[in-house]
Amino acid sequence: MSNLAENRLSIWCLLDGKAGHQNQVQGCADAIQRLTCAEIHSVELSGWNQGLRSLIRCDRRRLPDLAPDLIIGAGHASHFPLCMFRWRFGGRSIVLMKPSLPLSLFDFCLIPDVHRLRRVPDNTILTTGVLNRVLPGRHKDARRGMFLVGGPSGHYRWDSKLVYQQICDVVQRTSDVCWTVATSRRTPDDFFNFWRTNASVARLVSAADVGPDWLPAQLDAAATVWVTEDSVSMTYEALTSGASVGILELVRWQKNRVTDCIDSLVDSERAVRWTQWCETRQLKKAEAPFSEADRCAALLLDRLFPNRASQDIGQKAA
């Protein structure tokens, strides 16, 4: 049984081994936990995706002791497990993307608004971008800045030299800022090789050398963050932290939902492209906290467990 009788939600986070998906799932679960009393349990999906039989005849010992009240997943590999675990153990299923299965199979779908659904079902919440674990920074330091470097994708033509040149230009024109360059799992070897064979203009930190909590901690203090155009998720992490955000430009293969998302952020003046910055030398300052995870968590609790969040807040205040 779940912990609802003790006024605690049991949340199962389905993890498919992809850092971006884990970031979304953990961000949603953490936001719910900030609003109400909840226990978060991680469920690794490796081994569960060997067909329906592995899900139907599942080994209960590999799962949390507490049955779920909420089951959260992101990525195509989570879709069948979300449905099957809900069927076997109860709870409500929440998928953090536009699923490949019918929306009606899930209790709630959190879908980025770039999908431009013709009709928004009652069980769907449109999100601005993707959810993440980052919180609005409380220790912003104008002397600290970051570059978040992605890598090859199906949407942009990756060019390590071009990215390096843009980084150098920003660093040279902002001598009063201490810069850190953070790579991702997608960053190719040639970027590291190029960095080593050219003048190092900032501290380089590889994603392989740090844990999952390192980047959120750095974003808490960085007042300025530049992100390579290929990474929508890191762009929204930077925005959520409350930093001023710049876009390191790449050549896009074609216009699609990902490129439209970046264009929308630029058009709404939430982010500034490098070419624009070269003309003005100014980034747009964050005007208000931007936290989709908190907004969505509040909507989910209100729809699935009416008045629960307000009761918990009242108890904490008392």
Image: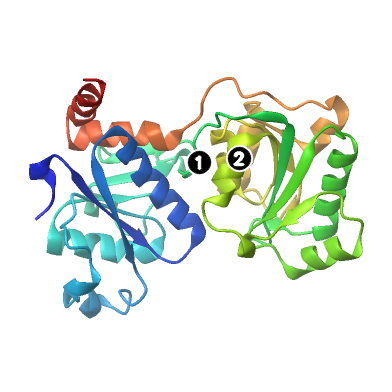
Task: Name the residue at 92% across, 56% down.
Answer: 199
Q: Earlier in the sequence, mark 2 or mark 1?
A: 1
Number of residues whose C-alpha sits closer than 10 Å to that of mark 1, classed few (under 14), some (14–19) or many (20 or more): many
Residue 260 image offset from top left, x and y in percent: 60, 41
Residue beneath disc 1: 134
Whether residue 97 is visible here, answered yes or no, is no
Name the residue that disc number 2 marks: 219
- Give left or right: position of 197 versus 82: right
- Please identify the quadrant where the C terminus is shown: top left
Quadrant assignment, res 9: top left
Label 2–label 1 contact, CB within 8 A:
yes
Q: Residue 139 location, x and y as percent?
A: 59, 30
**118 shown above or below 157:** above
Q: In this view, does 149 lie to the left or right of 124?
A: right
Between 150 and 10, the one nearer to me in the picture: 10
Question: Real-space Cα distance between discs 2 and 1?
Answer: 8 Å
User: Label 2: how many residues lie within 10 Å, few (<14), some (14-19) or many (20+)?
Assistant: many
Residue type of the residue flagged with mark 2 = Leu
| Point 74% across, 59% down: residue | 158
